[in-house]
């Protein structure tokens, strides 16, 4: 082979090396959805609001329904039609005494549905600084009894804040964001979202603690038909670029017959923040309990959206506790925030950023290129030596 031919082979090998390195680390979901947002305000004094975000894909639709009547609830319905719609019988919906007042049409197009209910805020006195929430509980805050403000809507993001009925300052807020494509928000924990997921940020701001050593827990209830969210898995990874010091993500999933297929999920990183501008310095660990079966009827009674959509809801409950032993108590900043994703299908999987990809590609690729270059150089040198050795000297 000529030197030019060997050079071409070397260039091809270099390109293959860098392309292989890049393919190892680049992931991504290019699927996009068109979003339309509609807010149904309720004029009755004791009622709440219903937000509907319709996310249309190529041949399917996701309906995100967020309701503040009763306990705040997010319902996601996945259909196999790009023309499916939501219909509400408002007198029955507001009466909250029968199921079927909210439907997705055609009903035959519904593939899967899942809902998350924010049912209670729990406070306990951690005077021994163990962060073990086993006793010393104060009376729970039932979120169905909170006084909720009207939703503050901005594009496909809605913010809802409420306060307990007793006099006092402080609030619990929930911010729902629905996305048409893959990406991340700017603030930590910077969870990776897709067009099949929504993000819910929950924060507690200025609620007076009933003890100087109070810590808080949030009770969630997941509702579904045949396959509600039933187990929590933990995935670990080696990159903490987007959420410093956090190397794992928790997944509350719906998995038929405990198989590998995932129908729906709630995903979060085990970290909360003690200030409204989250940073590593203000991060505090959070933990979750094992999901346990709940009474579907009780959950339905606390949430207008669950009552309206599900005729026979199956419910699972789980607590998320904030802070561990040795961490500052709630009254140090009077603020806590926690973020999660809720979606259908497989959860988004973190991949390396372009910066890290470049560093890894250089770190892995340059030594290989040097080895290949050295091998080609030695091969050419030996080829020349053998060519020279093949001629007889002329006297």
Image: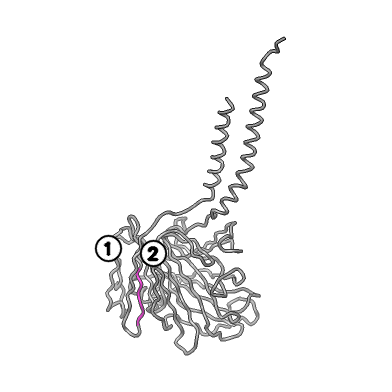
Q: Are marks 2 and 1 in contact (CB under 8 Å)?
A: no
| Residue furthest top in the image | 395
* Percent of width and height locating residue 332: 61, 80
The x and y percentages for residue 385 are: 68, 23
Residue tagged 1? 106
Q: Is residue 217 visible?
A: yes
Distance (Cα) linking label 2 and label 1:
19 Å
Residue 50 in the figure: left or right of residue 162: left
Q: Secondary structure at mark 1?
A: loop
Q: Is residue 256 visible?
A: no
Q: Nearer the viewer, residue 153 or 226?
A: 153
In the picture as drawn, the residue positioned furthest to the front comes out as: 395
**Quadrant of res 222:** bottom left
Q: Assign the C terminus to one quadrant of the image.
A: top right
Which of 102/289 is in front?
A: 102
* Magenta-colored stretch includes residue 152: no
Q: Is residue 191 above or below residue 217?
A: above
In this figure, which residue is indicated by the disc labeled 2? 226
Q: Which residues are magenta?
A: 47-52
The percent coordinates of residue 345 (x first, y second) are 42, 58
Quadrant location of the N terminus in the rendered image? top right
């Amino acid at each position: 082979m000529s030197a030019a031919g060997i050079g071409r082979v070397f260039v091809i090998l270099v390109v293959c090396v860098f392309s292989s390195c890049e393919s190892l680390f680049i992931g991504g979901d290019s699927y996009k959805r068109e979003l339309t947002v509609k807010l149904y305000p309720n004029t009755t004094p004791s009622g709440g609001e219903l937000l509907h975000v319709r996310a249309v894909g190529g041949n399917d639709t996701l309906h995100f329904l967020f309701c503040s009547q009763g306990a705040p609830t997010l319902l996601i319905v996945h259909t196999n039609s790009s023309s499916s719609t939501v219909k509400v019988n408002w007198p029955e919906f507001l009466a909250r005494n029968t199921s079927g007042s909210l439907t997705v049409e055609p009903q035959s197009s519904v593939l899967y549905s899942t809902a998350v209910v924010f049912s209670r805020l729990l406070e306990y006195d951690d005077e021994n600084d163990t962060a073990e929430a086993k006793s010393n509980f104060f009376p729970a805050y039932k979120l169905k009894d909170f006084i909720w403000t009207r939703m503050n809507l901005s594009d496909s993001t809605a913010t809802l804040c409420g306060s307990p009925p007793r006099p006092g300052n402080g609030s619990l807020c929930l911010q729902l964001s629905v996305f048409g494509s893959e990406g991340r928000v700017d603030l930590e924990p910077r969870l990776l979202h897709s067009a099949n997921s929504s993000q819910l940020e929950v924060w507690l701001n200025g609620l007076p603690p009933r003890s100087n050593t109070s810590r808080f827990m949030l009770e969630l209830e997941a509702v579904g038909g045949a396959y509600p969210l039933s187990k929590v898995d933990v995935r670990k990874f080696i990159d903490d670029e987007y959420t410093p010091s956090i190397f794992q993500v928790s997944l509350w999933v719906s998995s038929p017959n405990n198989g590998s297929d995932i129908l729906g999920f709630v995903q979060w990183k085990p970290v909360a923040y003690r200030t409204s501008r989250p940073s590593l310095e203000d991060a505090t660990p959070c933990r979750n309990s094992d999901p346990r079966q709940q009474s579907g009827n009780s959950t339905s009674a606390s949430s207008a959206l669950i009552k309206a959509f599900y005729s026979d809801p199956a419910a699972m409950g789980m607590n998320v506790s904030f802070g561990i032993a040795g961490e500052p108590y709630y009254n140090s900043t009077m603020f806590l925030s926690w973020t999660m994703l809720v979606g259908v299908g497989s959860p988004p999987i973190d991949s390396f950023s372009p910066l890290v990809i470049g560093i890894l590609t250089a770190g892995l690729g340059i030594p290989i290129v040097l080895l290949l270059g050295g091998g080609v150089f030695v091969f050419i040198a030996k080829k020349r030596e053998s060519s020279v050795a093949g001629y007889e000297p002329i006297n």
